[in-house]
Image: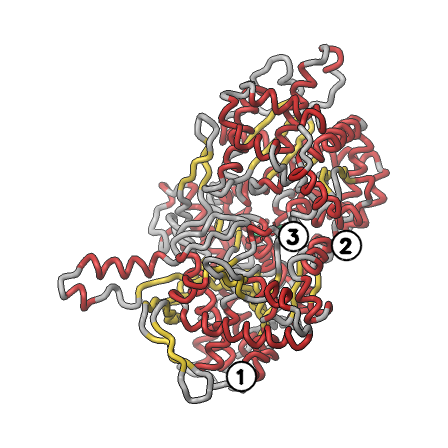
C-alpha cells in the first residue's frame, strides 16, 4: 500500500538514471548553479570535477535505493564484510564505467569545455587503508555488486586516511596528514537517522540469578553515526552499500559540567569521543596494543552488529534463525570483538542460554587470516581489555573455560596443548590471542593463497585443525577486479583485447577466463607489434607523469623494473636495492663496448614505511641516496636509472602497473600470504620476478614456469637457514662475496655517510632473519636471466601476451563466488528493471 499522498504524483516525480549526453549536461549545469552555487565563467577544474561527481552521484543513488529496496522486499540471506580498511582510490571513473556512462560523460564534459582525463585527476583518493588487505576489501566490494550479491561492507569513516609521504632532502620519509574530506566527499551520504550508542569502560556485574546474564553500566557512551558509500556493480543496476561509522559525542558536550564552569572538561569529553574515528593507524603487519585502536575496533564492531541485528529483527524471526539470514566475514582479526559482542547481546539483552548463543555465533562468523608473521598476530593485554571492555573480558574468559574443557576431554592430560591453545597467553601482562578467538568463534577459517592456507593449517592453527577437523580450514586465493586493474588503468590494452577477442568488453570483463582467447595471437607478428606499442605508450604516460609531478626526465627506451608495496623487511626491498648497487658496480667495471650490449633498465620503487619502523625508513633513505649517485653518474646513467616515487597510492599504482615490463615480488619464502599487485602486473602483461611464495606460485601454475622468473630458497628450507644464521653464522665474505662487496661500498660511504646505514646492514650481518645472504646469488642470477630474455624482444612480447591470457583465475569475481558458495551460502539477488514497492 502506498503510504503517502498520491502514488501517481510520486511516480511522475521520480528521477531516472541519465541516459543521453543532453541529460548529463543538464544535470552537470544544474549542479554548477545550485549545489555549487558557481558561474560558468569562473568554474575551475575542481568545480568541474565536483559537478560531474554530483551528477553521477544522483545516478548511483537511484540504483542504490532500488537495490536496497529489492533486498528489503525479498529478504535474502545477506553477507557483511567487516574490514577496518577499505582502500578505495578514486570513484568517478569507476562509477562511470560501471554505470556504462563513460563515453557519454566524456562527451558532455568536453562539450562544456573541460578535458575529461584532467577532470578525473582532480579527485582525491579515498585512502582508508594501508595496503593489500584494504585494497582486497575494495576489489571484493566491486565484485559483490557486479555479481549482484547482497553484501554490505562495514568500516570506519576516518577523518584522515593513510598519511601522505614526503621525502626530505636527506632521503628520509616525512609524514603529513591526509585531509581527504577537505574538499567535501560527494560519494558519501550522511545518515543522521542511523545512530547507535556505544559504551566503553564502566562496570560489569554478573547477575546471581542462574541465567549467566550481567549488567554493564557506567563509563563513557559515544554515538556512532552512519555514512553510506554507494558501490555500483559493473553492467548491472545492483548498487551495494559500504557503511562507514563516525564517532560523535552523545550530546554536543556535557552540559552539566559546562554549566558548573568546567568548560575544558566538557569539551575534552566531546573531543575524546570524536578522536575514535579521527585517524587510520598506519601500521601494517604490527600489532601496537594502543587503547585508541582497541576503542576503534570495538566502536566499529558494536555499531555494525547493532545495525545488522536491527535489520534482522525487522524480519520478525526468532534469533536462532540468524545464521539463515546473516553471514559475517571477519577481515583478519581486527573485528574479532564482534564474537564476544554478539554473545553479550544474545545473553545479556536477548536472554538466550550460553549454548544456544554460542551455537548461533559459531554459525554466523567466518574468519580470513592474512598473515603468519608472528609480529602481526593481534594480542590485547588483559588489563587493558578489562578496563575498556569489562563485560567482554568476562565473556572471553567463559568462552576459554568451556573451550579448554572440551580440549581436555579430547586430549586428556595434555597440558602443553591446553597452554598452546588457550585464548589467554600467560605472561606479564597476560594477553588475549585474537586469532584463537576468531578461529573458535567462526564457522570456517581461510587463508588467501594455497601455500599460505597450508601454512595456517600446519603452523599457527595446527592444534585447532587437530581439535576441530581439517574441513573447517580452507583456502580462497585472492583476486583483483579487472574493471579497475585492466579496463580503467590500461584503456588501450583493454580496447585491443576487445577487438581481438571479438567479444563485447562486458563479456570478458565479467568472465576473465575469456582472455585465453589471446593465446594464439602470441604467434601473430602484427598483434605483437600492437601489444608492444601499447606498453611503450604506457611507459611514456608514466614518464610524463613523473616529469609533471617530480620534474624528472626518465628514459623510456629501457626495461621498466618495478617494486611497489609497503616497505617491510619481509618483502625485501633491501634485496632489490642491493641488487641495483651490484649492477651499478658491474656496469662501472665494463668497457664502453661491453656496456653498449647491456640491457638498459629503469628501476622504480614506491611504498610507505610505518612511521615508527626505523629499518624500513632507513631502506627508503638508502634507495633515495643510491638513486642520487647512480642517476648522476655519466658513465652509467644511460644504462641504469633508479627512482623512488613518493606517496604511493592506488592512483599512482594505476599509472605504474601498465608501464611495467617486469615487477618484483621477492619476499622470503613463506612470508607473503598472497600478494595481489603481482596479479595486477601480470594482468597488464608485465612479467614476474619472484620467490616461490604466496600467489606467485599459483600465477606460475597458470601462466607456465617458463613465463615467470623464480629464484631463492623454498619455504621448507627457511627454518633451517635461520637456525644456521643464529648458531653457525658464517661471515658474509665467505658465504656470499658479491653481497659482502656491496655492503662494503655502502658502509664505506659511497652513498653518503656510511654510518647511518649500519642498523640496516646489521640486520643482514647479524641474524639475517629474512635470508638476504642465502638468496642474493640466485637473485642476481635471476636478474641476468631477465636481461637476457628481454634482449629477445619478440620472445619477450610472446611471454607478455601469454601471461595476460592466463590470468583469468585471478579475477576477484572468482574469489567472491567461492566465498558466496562455500562460505556464506548466499545467492545473487537481482534488481528488477522497474522498481517495485
Ligand atoms: C596486509 O595488507 C596483509 C596482511 C596483514 O596481516 C595485514 Br595487517 C595487512 C596483506 C598480505 O600481506 C598480502 O600478502 C595479501 O595479499 C593481502 O593482505 C590480502 O590478503
The residue labelled by disc 1 is 319
**Up-down: is 282 above or below 621?**
below
Helix, strand or loop at mark 1: helix
In the rendered view, would you say 100 is above or below 256? above
First along the sequence among labels 1 and 3: 1
Residue occupying image coordinates x 61% and y 79%: 324
Where residue 44 appears, x then y in whole percent?
40, 41
How far from the left and from the top, in percent, is residue 646? 51, 35
Q: Nearer the viewer, mark 1 or mark 3?
A: 1
Give the mark nearest the N terminus, 2 or 3.
3
Please tell me which residue is depicted at 67% across the width and 20% down the height of the picture. Answer: 639
Residue that numbered label 3 is attached to: 480
* Quadrant housing residue 527: top right
Q: Which residue is more in the foreground, 739 or 221?
A: 739
Q: Residue 360: which quarter of the image? A: bottom right
Q: Secondary structure at mark 2?
A: helix
| Dot label at residue 513 | 2
State if disc 3 and disc 1 touch (CB < 8 Å): no
Amino acid at each position: 500500500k502506498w503510504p503517502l499522498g498520491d502514488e501517481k504524483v510520486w511516480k511522475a516525480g521520480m528521477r531516472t538514471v541519465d541516459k543521453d549526453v543532453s541529460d548529463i549536461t543538464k544535470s552537470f549545469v544544474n549542479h554548477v548553479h545550485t549545489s555549487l552555487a558557481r558561474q560558468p565563467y569562473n568554474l575551475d577544474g575542481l568545480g568541474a570535477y565536483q559537478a560531474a561527481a554530483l551528477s553521477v552521484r544522483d545516478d548511483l543513488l537511484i540504483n542504490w535505493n532500488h537495490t536496497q529496496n529489492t533486498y528489503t522486499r525479498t529478504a535474502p540471506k545477506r553477507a557483511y564484510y567487516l574490514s577496518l580498511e577499505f582502500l578505495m582510490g578514486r570513484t568517478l571513473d569507476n562509477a562511470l564505467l560501471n554505470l556504462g556512462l563513460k563515453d557519454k560523460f566524456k562527451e558532455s564534459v568536453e562539450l562544456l569545455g573541460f578535458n575529461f582525463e584532467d577532470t578525473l585527476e582532480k579527485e582525491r583518493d579515498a585512502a582508508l587503508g594501508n595496503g593489500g588487505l584494504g585494497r582486497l576489501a575494495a576489489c571484493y566490494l566491486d565484485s559483490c555488486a557486479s555479481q549482484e550479491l547482497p553484501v554490505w561492507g562495514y568500516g570506519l569513516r576516518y577523518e584522515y586516511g593513510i598519511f601522505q609521504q614526503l621525502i626530505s632532502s636527506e632521503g628520509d620519509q616525512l609524514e603529513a596528514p591526509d585531509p581527504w574530506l577537505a574538499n567535501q566527499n560527494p560519494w558519501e551520504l550522511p545518515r543522521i537517522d542511523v545512530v547507535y550508542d556505544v559504551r566503553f569502560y564502566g562496570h560489569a556485574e554478573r547477575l546471581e540469578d542462574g541465567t549467566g546474564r550481567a549488567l554493564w553500566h557506567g563509563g563513557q557512551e559515544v554515538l556512532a553515526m552512519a555514512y553510506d558509500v554507494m558501490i555500483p556493480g559493473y553492467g548491472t543496476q545492483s548498487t551495494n552499500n559500504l557503511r562507514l561509522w563516525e564517532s560523535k559525542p552523545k550530546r554536543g558536550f556535557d552540559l552539566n559540567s559546562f554549566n558548573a564552569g568546567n568548560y575544558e572538561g566538557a569539551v575534552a569529553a566531546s573531543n575524546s569521543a570524536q578522536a575514535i574515528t579521527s585517524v587510520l593507524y598506519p601500521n601494517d603487519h604490527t600489532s601496537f596494543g594502543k587503547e585508541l585502536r582497541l576503542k576503534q575496533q570495538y566502536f566499529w564492531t558494536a555499531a555494525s552488529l547493532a545495525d545488522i541485528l536491527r535489520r534482522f529483527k525487522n524480519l520478525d524471526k526468532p534469533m536462532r534463525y540468524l545464521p539463515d539470514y546473516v553471514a559475517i566475514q571477519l577481515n583478519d582479526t581486527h573485528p574479532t570483538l564482534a564474537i564476544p559482542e554478539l554473545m553479550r547481546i544474545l545473553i545479556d539483552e536477548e536472554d538466550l542460554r550460553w549454548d544456544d548463543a554460542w551455537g548461533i555465533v559459531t554459525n554466523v562468523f567466518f574468519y580470513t587470516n592474512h598473515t603468519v608473521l608472528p609480529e602481526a598476530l593481534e594480542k590485547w593485554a588483559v588489563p587493558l581489555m578489562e578496563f575498556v571492555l569489562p563485560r567482554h573480558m568476562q565473556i572471553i574468559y567463559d568462552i576459554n573455560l568451556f573451550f579448554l574443557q572440551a580440549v581436555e576431554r579430547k586430549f586428556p592430560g595434555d597440558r602443553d596443548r591446553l597452554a598452546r591453545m588457550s585464548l589467554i597467553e600467560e605472561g606479564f601482562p597476560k594477553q588475549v590471542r585474537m586469532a584463537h578467538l576468531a578461529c573458535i568463534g567462526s564457522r570456517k577459517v581461510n587463508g588467501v593463497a594455497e601455500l599460505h592456507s597450508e601454512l595456517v593449517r600446519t603452523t599457527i592453527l595446527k592444534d585447532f585443525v587437530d581439535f576441530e577437523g581439517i574441513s573447517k580450514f580452507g583456502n580462497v586465493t585472492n583476486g583483483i577486479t579487472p574493471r579497475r586493474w585492466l579496463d580503467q588503468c590500461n584503456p588501450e590494452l583493454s580496447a585491443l583485447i576487445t577487438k581481438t577477442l571479438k567479444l563485447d568488453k562486458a563479456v570478458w570483463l565479467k568472465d576473465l577466463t575469456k582472455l585465453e582467447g589471446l593465446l594464439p595471437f602470441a604467434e601473430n607478428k602484427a598483434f605483437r607489434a600492437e601489444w608492444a606499442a601499447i606498453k611503450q605508450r604506457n611507459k611514456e604516460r608514466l614518464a610524463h607523469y613523473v616529469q609533471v609531478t617530480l620534474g624528472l626526465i626518465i628514459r623510456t627506451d629501457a626495461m621498466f623494473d618495478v617494486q611497489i608495496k609497503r616497505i617491510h623487511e619481509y618483502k625485501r626491498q633491501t634485496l632489490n636495492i642491493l641488487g641495483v648497487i651490484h649492477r651499478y658496480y658491474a656496469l662501472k667495471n665494463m668497457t664502453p663496448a661491453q656496456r653498449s650490449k647491456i640491457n638498459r633498465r629503469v628501476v622504480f620503487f614506491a611504498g610507505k614505511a610505518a612511521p615508527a619502523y626505523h629499518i624500513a625508513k632507513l631502506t627508503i633513505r638508502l634507495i633515495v641516496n643510491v638513486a642520487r649517485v647512480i642517476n648522476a653518474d655519466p658513465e652509467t646513467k644511460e644504462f641504469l636509472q633508479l627512482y623512488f616515487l613518493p606517496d604511493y597510492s592506488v592512483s599512482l599504482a594505476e599509472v605504474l602497473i601498465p608501464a611495467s615490463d617486469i615487477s618484483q615480488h621477492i619476499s622470503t619464502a613463506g612470508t607473503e600470504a598472497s600478494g595481489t599487485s603481482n596479479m595486477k602486473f601480470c594482468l597488464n602483461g608485465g612479467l614476474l620476478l619472484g620467490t616461490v611464495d604466496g600467489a606467485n606460485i599459483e600465477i606460475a601454475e597458470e601462466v607456465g614456469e617458463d613465463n615467470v622468473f623464480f629464484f631463492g630458497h623454498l619455504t621448507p628450507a627457511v627454518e633451517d637457514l635461520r637456525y644456521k644464521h643464529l648458531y653457525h653464522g658464517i661471515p658474509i665474505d665467505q658465504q656470499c662475496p658479491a653481497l659482502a662487496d656491496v655492503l662494503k661500498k655502502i658502509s664505506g660511504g659511497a652513498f653518503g655517510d656510511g654510518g647511518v646505514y649500519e642498523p640496516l646492514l646489521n640486520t643482514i650481518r647479524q641474524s639475517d632473519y629474512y635470508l638476504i645472504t642465502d638468496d642474493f646469488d640466485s637473485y642476481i642470477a635471476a636478474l641476468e636471466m631477465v636481461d637476457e630474455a628481454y634482449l629477445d624482444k619478440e620472445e619477450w612480447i610472446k611471454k607478455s601476451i601469454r601471461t595476460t591470457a592466463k590470468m583469468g583465475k585471478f579475477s576477484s569475481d572468482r574469489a567472491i563466488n567461492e566465498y558466496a558458495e562455500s562460505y556464506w551460502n548466499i545467492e545473487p539477488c537481482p534488481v528488477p528493471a522497474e522498481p517495485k514497492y
